[in-house]
Amino acid sequence: MVPLPENSIASRLLVWFDQYGRKDLPWQSPRTSYRVWVSEIMLQQTQVTTAIPYFERFIERFDSLQSLAAADEDEVLHYWSGLGYYARCRNLHKSARLIVEQGQSDLPDTVEELETLPGIGRSTAAAIVAQVWNKPEAILDGNVKRVLSRYQCVTGWTGSSAVQKTLWKLAEEYTPEKRVADYTQAIMDLGATVCKRSKPMCEDCPLRSDCLALKNDCVDVLPTPKKKKVLPEKRNQFIVIKNSQQQLLLQKRPPAGIWGSLWSLPESEMDSDVVEFCSNELGLKVIKQEELPVLKHSFSHYHLFITPVVVQCESYDDKIMEQKEWCWYQRDQSDVLGLPAPVSAIINSLSE
């Protein structure tokens, strides 16, 4: 790491940060290792403005590493519901339990130790160490990749190993010895608020005087995007099964895969006979059924078109409830369950 000479990238970013940087984010006050860790995991796939209300709600319920470790997985997933990429939540919960089981009361304070925990990679570990303990560790999240790619006119998709190696070298070179927490926040803020993906505000950038992308008029094409693929489409029926008490039948999904460990609605292939499915698979007799409008939900690798079918059944509760992965769910019940966003949307539409 380099010292902080006048007019270096770090010095200019810190001057800019002192005037324009974000200093009132909820995880900054108080700035504890637990709060920073939760925020960094949330921000792996989520923008700051979207993450803030989820963070505040999550921290209000799980105010410490110990309370998170002691919580039931269903409840933890419930407080994450809507943020997506649920493996992040499961890994967060798993890591909290590992730390407590090892007799520790706090997160480890080195990148190497943090990287041994589920869901924590090099950049996330470095961000935690820099933000909490002010240690000179370089970070390379999406915002930083964009700033460095443009500043040094680095071409090529940032997900490739060769480009990542170049960007890591630059990130390490520019990270100062002092005020590391402020510097890491500054370069992330610059990417989020000025050096934006679209419509960057180059006139407001403290690095504009020697930005190679600006000099070569190629800001708009950097970073080089990954070649887009046409996402495939999948279609499925979600069966909204009501019993005589107007409870809804939910099924817990496997830990791995889409919506891992969340509670969802039973699914069947499009155009399959719902009456036969309920009878053959669940032992339920359908009294009536109604098809709701199609709901689209997009994942990173495909689009899912959901056709909800509401069915009223004569229920045989004992048969279903013998299996732990099934439950009858009352929409106003106090028990909290983690539900995928489209499932919540379907259930809420019934109330309306």
Image: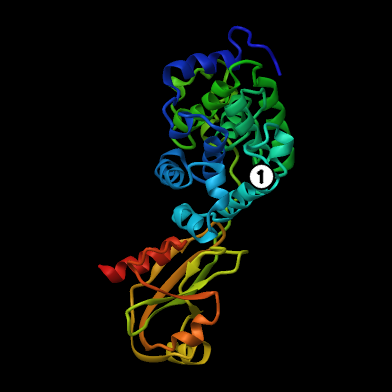
In the displayed image of the protein, which residue is found farthest to the top? Answer: 6
Which residue is found at the position 51% from the left and 29% from the top?
31
**Which x, y percent locates residue 224?**
60, 39
**Which x, y percent locates residue 33?**
57, 34
Q: Quadrant of the C terminus?
A: bottom left
**Which x, y percent locates residue 81?**
45, 56
In the displayed structure, 58 sits above or below 11; it is below
Residue 316, image quadrant: bottom left
Residue 245, image quadrant: bottom left
In the displayed structure, 274 sits above or below 85; it is below
**Which x, y percent locates residue 296?**
42, 65
Find disc 1 in the rendering and name its residue: 99
User: What crowding class fits label 1: few (fewer than 14 Cα within 10 Å), some (14-19), or many (20 or more)?
Assistant: some
Say which amino acid is labelled 1. Answer: Ile
- Camera-side residue: 45 or 76? 76
- Camera-side residue: 9 or 258? 258
Q: Is residue 142 left or right of residue 3?
A: left
Which residue is found at the position 47% from the left and 61% from the top?
338
